[in-house]
Image (spheres, helix red, strand yellow):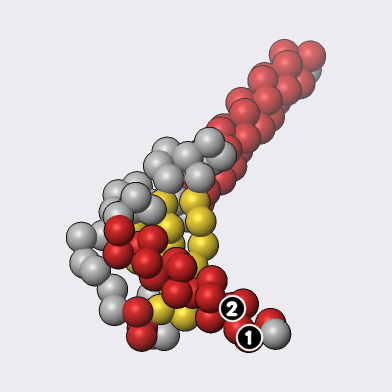
Amino acid sequence: MPGLSTKSLILASLLGLLLLLLMCSTSQAQSNQDCCLSYSKVRLPRKVITGFTEQLSGEVCDIDAIIFHTIRGLKACVNPKEDWVKKHLLFLSLKLKKMSM
């Protein structure tokens, strides 16, 4: 019977390793879903934007991006270097400043 316990130990170790690999690959896939991988080509009107999030390439994601949140609950990844994006960000920051007064 000693051979049976060795086989059981090897099988349990392999199953544990497989489970660990599945958990790691799932968490990586989930974190990539939260990153912008490219920029939207559509210029959003200011009136549909309710807020934004900044994504930095030095953290988890590959590119710098601004993620605009819309009134319909959608998110749009845009290039922070675009002039229209800078103007929208300035408008939003001034609006926030007025609200906090």
Residue, disc 1: 99
| Residue at figure coordinates x 36%, y 85% from the top left | 47
Q: How many marks?
A: 2
The quadrant in which residue 16 appears is top right
- Above or below for 84 versus 38: below
Image location of residue 9, percent across then percent down: 73, 23
- In terms of depth relative to the viewer, which is nearer, 44 or 97? 97
| Residue at figure coordinates x 69%, y 82% from the top left | 100
The quadrant in which residue 40 appears is bottom left
Whether residue 58 appears in this view of the structure is yes
Q: Residues under labels 1 and 2: Cα distance?
A: 5 Å
Residue, disc 2: 96
Mark 2: which amino acid?
Leu
Image location of residue 94, percent across then percent down: 53, 75
Image location of residue 20, percent across then percent down: 62, 35
Q: Quadrant of the C terminus?
A: bottom right
Q: Which structural element holds mark 1? A: helix
- In terms of depth relative to the viewer, which is nearer, 66 or 97? 97
- Above or below for 32 versus 68: above
- In terms of depth relative to the viewer, which is nearer, 32 or 90? 90
